[in-house]
Amino acid sequence: MQKKEFNGVLAIRITLLGLIANFILAILKGFIGFISNSSALIADAGHSFSDLLSDGITLWAVKMSNIPKDKNHPYGHGKFETVGTFFVSIMLIITGIGIAWHLFNKLDSPEVPGIISLWMAAIAIVVKEGLFHITRFVSKKTGSKILLANAWHHRSDAISSVAAFIGIGGSQLGVPLMDPLAGVLVSGLIIKTGIDIGY
């Protein structure tokens, strides 16, 4: 197997791993956030869902960029990575704005989330930080910019899970407003990540 072919297979495998992890995390965070009344965890689930979409675009872009040169693309298909990265950034910005809009309406009547949401946030931090390190390692090995963007997307999700963890923990300690405020902070992190990746 040639080096470029091997790198392409490696990039696809790490992206599939991220896609499966994000799918599971999005469902678990959304479900647990809903049953435990945690705005921060629901916002974090939205971030995981945007990660899921981003993994789908990354997978498409990686596959397209590995197609050999042809008559219509004499320089290859590498620019598909740039297009994919741009769409990832747009999706992040839209997701962040949508979540913030929803949470501003909940600031008037905050609720104290159940303890299970705190555990879910902790698990998400560990999983997403692990995905960040693995994906970044593969991006350096393969030289893939979109994989690097996706790695930082994993890191931003880990940070948003930290914010959710702090917000949920603060609510548990008697400051109910901390949960929706953490959700708003998470949405701001999502928007910032989208802008940084797009730039």
Image (cartoon, rainbow, N blue to C red):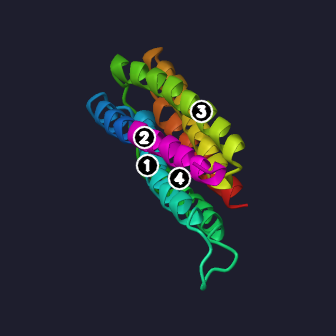
Residue marked by disc 4: 96
172 or 128: nearer the eye? 128
Tag 3 residue? 134
Tag 1: amino acid:
Leu
Cα gap from disc 2 to disc 3, whole angstroms = 14 Å
Nearer to us in this view, 10 or 39? 10
Which stretch is magenta? 1-21
Label 4 and label 3: CA atoms lie apart by 25 Å
Q: Which label lies toward us, 1 or 4?
A: 1
Quarter of the rendering containing residue 53: bottom left
Q: Residues within 10 Å of mark 1 (few under 14, many from 20)?
A: many
**x and y percentages locating residue 174 in the rendered image:** 46, 17
For the C terminus, the image quarter is bottom right
Distance from Cα at disc 1 to Cα at disc 3: 17 Å
Q: Name the residue under label 1.
A: 52
Distance from Cα at disc 1 to Cα at disc 2: 5 Å
Placement of 38 over or under 1, stated as above or below: above
**Residue at the disc numbered 2:** 22
Front disc: 2 or 3: 3
